[in-house]
Image (cartoon, grey):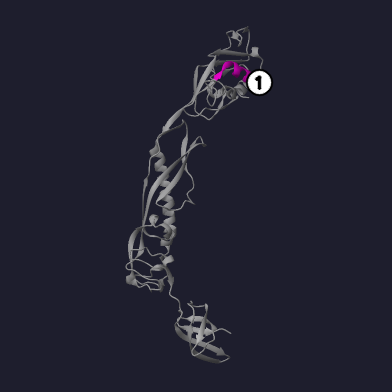
Amino acid sequence: MSPFNAIRRQPLGGALGAVLLWLGSLFGTPAWAINGTAVPTALLRVEMRPQAQVQQAQVQLGDIAILSSPDLALLRRAMALPLGQAPRIGDTAVLELDRLALWLRSRTGLREDQVQWQGSTSTVLTVAARELPGEEVVDKAQSALRDHLMAGVAQKGWIEPRIEMQAVSVPSTTLIPLGGSSLRVRPLGNVPVGKRMLVWVDVLVHGQHVKTIPVRFEVSLFTLAPVAANDMAVGTSVQADNLVMREVDAARLGDVGPSALGQPAILGGGDAVAAQRVRRNLHSGDVVTPAHLQPVPAVSRGEWVSLVSRSGLVSLESRVEVLQDGQVGQVVRARPLNATGVLLARVTAPGHLELQP
């Protein structure tokens, strides 16, 4: 059990106990042991201080103490003696000399009379810290979120996109360990676009994760999109004057879905509209997405069209009634004129069928 584990059971204990040992003294003076008995020589000399402060998470004896010894190998081993994890920021830990002495002897194999102790009988340990402003976290999160949204917009081919975002609240200033710190935004690849978006920012010190701070944003994602100029019922053929281009906030479209706006097939070149008809009822001012429209079929149910049937070099043409909508290449059901039976025919062009064998 490390001395820090023992300290956690003391009334003043925190996350860690503390040791401060000072280096650089000569060995000419008499040493004294823990029980006060003088000894003529010592292989290791340790001086504890009343208080110590560390920066790193994992504490070694040499990080918070100064040691001296005529044996260089022993000195290196003692300086690297692990003491445990530093206390959390704002907490303190207390390490008592007698517990440290037992820990040191058990790890180095030294006898009691081979270690000279000086200074305080206990040490209070704290962690050096600095303030991390909430604005710094918001800036990092906002930059990452903007890049994420712009990459998605570019992939979807939106027209004249514009992004506005505002942090719902700024995180409070927080204390982090002193040292090389960095902020890292968690990947946003699976975060859906919406009017409110959450970004998680990890705080790292010396490459080690310290804490995670959430930042929530109000998002407006504007783009030019086709909007219904008038009410249109299901089945209505869409004409150029039925649609107008307006700037809309895609993040607030709900179940329409911003991704649907990235499909430019609704409008053709200029003001021309591809041959489409309304699949769902549209009201004036509704944003029109591909989910609202469907291509006008090459043949429509109830329409009379030309049917060609072939037998060798002979081709016969007749009129048939189409019983279901169909696009070029599809097979539809049709009924010949003055007949009750149904046949299958392939759509070869708008208004034209070819009898299937």
Say which element carries label 1.
helix
Image coordinates for residue 25, horizontal then vertical, percent: 54, 14
Q: Is residue 7 left or right of residue 201?
A: right
Q: How many marks?
A: 1
* 115 displayed left or right of 166: right
Image coords of residue 245 (percent x, y): 33, 64
Q: Magenta-highlighted stretch: main secondary structure? A: helix
Residue 82 position, x and y percent, is 59, 26
In the image, residue 261 lies in the stretch drawn in magenta: no
Q: Quadrant of residue 283?
A: bottom left
Q: Which residue occupies the foreground of this view, 215 or 82?
A: 215
Give the vertical position of 152 relative to 234 (above or below): above
Instruction: Please tell me which residue is depicted at 41% across the width and 45% down the height of the picture.
Output: 216
From the top left corner, tell me how far across and down residue 316 is, in percent. 52, 91
| The image quarter in which residue 43 lies | top right
Q: Quadrant of the C terminus?
A: bottom right
- In this rendering, the answer to whether 82 lies above or below 343 is above
For the residue pair 321 and 70, the one nearer the viewer reads as 321
Callout 1 amino acid: Ser
Asked which quadrant contains residue 60, the reply is: top right
Give the answer, above or below, for where 128 lies relative to 209: above
For disc 1, the neighbor class at 10 Å (few under 14, some 14 to 19, many from 20) is few
Q: Circle 1 sits on which residue?
A: 106
Q: Is residue 191 left or right of residue 168?
A: right
When the figure is inspected, residue 39 is found, relative to residue 80, above or below; the finding is: above
Residue 98 falls left or right of residue 261: right
Q: Magenta residues?
A: 95-108
